[in-house]
Amino acid sequence: MASISEDTTHTQNPAQNPEDERLSIGANLAYGLQHVLTMYGGIVAVPLILGQAAGLNSGDVGLLVTASLFAGGLATILQTIGVPFFGSRLPLVQGVSFSGVATMIAISGNGGIPAILGAVIAASLIGLLITPVFSRITRFFPPLVTGIVITTIGLTLMPVAAFWAMGGNKAAPDFGSTANIQLAAVTLIIVLLLSKLGNASISRLSILLSIVIGTGIAYVAGMTDFSQVANGPVFALPRIFHFGYPTFELAAVISMLIVIMVTLVETSADILAVGEIVETKVDSRRLGDGLRADMLSSILAPVVGSFTQSAFAQNVGLVAVTGVKSRYVVATGGLFLVTLGLLPIMGRVVASVPTSVLGGAGIVLFGTVAASGIRTLSKVEYNNNMNLVIVATSIGFGMIPIAAPGFYEHFPAWVATIFHSGISSAAVMAILLNLLFNHFTAGNSDQQSVFVAATERTIRYQDIARLHDGDYFLNGKLYDAKGTEVPLIAAEAH
């Protein structure tokens, strides 16, 4: 791998935005690969689950996986590089959205994969048409709301890290074994040591290096197997409508439209979150361009056999951990994904990385997302308002589906679709409560509930220094030791 030095890695004009920073080719390749390894498990999970639910054979499931990699790569390039009216031009990795898995499984039971593809195309087209509405809601996403959402994203992803650390496959005999968890712990320790002891470049590559080292340890310990890498084609083009031409069923489209609405909310939150982490402005136009890229990618993905596309929250965490804010790094990651979609053998190599290794790295990644949200919430004003209650209620509401995954199983399907995600639950609650208490102020009490954070009492030292022995306050007035009133000057006049 090319040597990356502080002199050659960065080329940035002080006047340009942080996301427009250009790095060396070696840095782009290394950091881009790090993004791919971070989200690889998530992007292949959906096609694996749907393929198995639809009863596809292993060959067709493999085609679903490579199609998702290819479509996710193109969507990532569109989102980061952008064309007029499409693409936020922020470091966001795109991939198959997990929010619609339950809905798509239900649709596949009635119409198979073609019904899923048709529902995704139709619902995403409707989503594309309504993006102007979502692009104008940035004023309803102050630090109060974005901080809640970013914190919840991190907390929501922590069970994923734990699941990965245990092995990632409940059906496997070694799921939750001491060996898996120890491998995850070793990977975590490597991340921390590289972050502390390495120079700036090594620290930024700590996630990638820890995954490589962790995989090497797993290979020596006999916990990973590369024997399947050579089985299968080396190169394969995506197959157009391999699973049949899409069919359009009204009920399926309506169900998928709810998923698209949730995806728009989550993608809006991710765009605003990464904007906060990168420290660049996200206005309504930029948000709209990002959402349109999301929807256009979701319309086109079914052509090659993939599904709805959205931003990956775990990669938002990687941006926060490494401090590498360049969108060109993520675009390079998109090229890697396209390559993996065309070269199944490369995908098989990456698939050989033990899930436990990804779990150890994920603890740092996802925890950093939550920490970034807490840092954003520290900027919020809590005096004489209901902001503390908004934070507490929204995060608590977002934790319900994490603490009790079956909480909404007896509710109508549309309720479960919207609120099964802790991210969308917290986002909806934060937006509604912020509107209720901070925008619709009619009915707000001057002395709001006991949960309101009290104003800290402070007295300036210079004011105390002017007091004399024997001075005292009585009924709001200051008197000296002889009982003579001392004039008080109003702060404004002073």
Image (cartoon, rainbow, N blue to C red):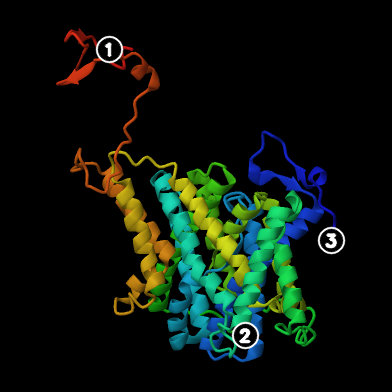
Q: Distance between the residues labelled 1 and 3?
A: 69 Å
Q: Is residue 470 above or below residue 420?
A: above
Q: Which residue is drawn at 70% across and 73% down?
A: 341
Q: Which residue is drawn at 23% across and 47% down?
A: 450
The residue that disc 1 covers is 489
Quarter that holds the C terminus: top left
Q: Which residue is drawn at 48% across and 60% down?
A: 153
Packing grade of label 2 (10 A; few <14, some 14-19, many >=20) is: some
Left or right: residue 374 compared with residue 184: left
Tag nearer the camera, 2 or 3: 3
The residue that disc 2 covers is 61
- Image location of residue 329, percent across then percent down: 70, 54
Q: What residue type is labelled 2?
A: Val
Left or right: residue 258 compared with residue 117: left
Q: Which amino acid does label 3 sit on?
A: Met
Left or right: residue 62 compared with residue 267: right
> Residue 360 falls in which quadrant of the image?
bottom right
- Image location of residue 397, percent across then percent down: 34, 63
Which is more toward the observer, 326 or 210? 210
Earlier sequence position, callout 2 versus callout 3: 3
Which is more toward the observer, 189 or 6? 189
- Image location of residue 319, percent across then percent down: 62, 54
Which is more toward the observer, 86 or 399? 399
Q: In this view, does 74 lie above or below 234?
A: above
Q: Is residue 342 above or below residue 449?
A: below
Q: How far apart are marks 2 and 3 (CA)?
A: 33 Å
